[in-house]
């Protein structure tokens, strides 16, 4: 969903929005606001990766502006970067970018958005759908559904059952 008319990347990068907006080719782009399951999955992912930061030599961040191209800034729900000091706006390809579907999002439209992370050079991109308990990962040439998500060539992984077991523990 487009939120406004044309504006410069300089204006965007020097403005704060609440909630933050993405920037695509001169236009501000709204994101669907996550509800409980989206927020919960995002928190669980941050906890999971945070527990493994030293072991996997990574840092975890959520919704951090990531400049995927000269005229595009995305806000991945979760991203992993190297241990080096990081700028306020990520410009180097993340090790992993994760998008979590919200109500109103589809795999198809999110895969198009994720093309920006792939073209930027991200090692891996995952899309997680808490509503139907599925996930897809980019394997270098196509999207594949999986129950275990991995970043090729690294020890980084996630068993989706970890998320689903903790998503709504009262459901049993």
Image (cartoon, rainbow, N blue to C red):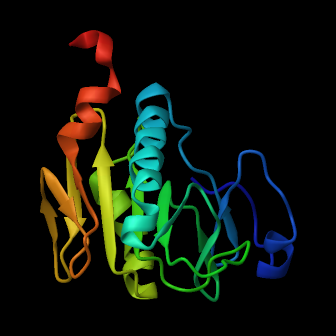
Residue at the spot x=48%, y=40% of the render?
A: 43
Residue at the spot x=45%, y=63% of the render?
A: 53
In the image, 153: left or right of 36?
Answer: left
Residue at the spot x=45%, y=77% of the render?
A: 116
Q: Is residue 81 above or below residue 15?
A: below
Q: Position of residue 162 (x, y in %)?
A: 24, 39
Q: Position of residue 52 (x, y in %)?
A: 39, 58
**Quadrant of the image occupied by residue 5:** bottom right
Q: Which of 95 and 98 is in front in this view?
A: 95
Q: In this view, does 83 lie above or below 113?
A: below
Q: Where is residue 80 in the image (x, y as percent from the top left)?
A: 46, 67
In the image, 83: left or right of 160?
Answer: right
**Quadrant of the image occupied by residue 15:** bottom right
In the picture as drawn, the residue positioned furthest to the front comes out as: 55
Q: Where is residue 111 in the image (x, y as percent from the top left)?
A: 32, 64
Residue at the spot x=50%, y=78% of the render?
A: 82
Q: Is residue 122 above or below residue 159?
A: below
Q: Which of 10 and 133 is in front in this view?
A: 133
Q: Which quarter of the rendering shows the C terminus?
A: top left
Q: In this view, does 133 lie above or below 22?
A: above
Question: What number of labels is visible?
Answer: 0
């Amino acid at each position: 969903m487009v939120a406004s008319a044309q504006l410069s990347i300089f204006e965007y990068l020097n403005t704060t929005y609440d909630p933050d907006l993405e920037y695509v080719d001169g236009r501000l782009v709204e994101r669907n606001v996550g509800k409980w399951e989206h927020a919960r999955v995002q928190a669980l992912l941050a906890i999971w990766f945070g527990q493994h930061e030293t072991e996997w030599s990574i840092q975890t961040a959520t919704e951090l502006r990531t400049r995927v191209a000269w005229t595009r800034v995305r806000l991945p729900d979760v991203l992993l970067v190297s241990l080096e000091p990081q700028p306020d706006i990520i410009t180097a390809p993340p090790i992993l970018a994760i998008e979590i579907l919200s109500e109103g999002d589809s795999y198809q439209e999110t895969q198009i958005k994720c093309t920006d992370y792939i073209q930027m050079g991200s090692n891996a991109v995952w899309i997680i759908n808490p509503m139907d308990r599925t996930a897809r990962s980019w394997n270098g040439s196509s999207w594949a559904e999986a129950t275990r998500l991995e970043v090729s060539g690294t020890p980084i992984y996630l068993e989706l059952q970890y998320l689903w077991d903790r998503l709504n523990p009262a459901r049993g």
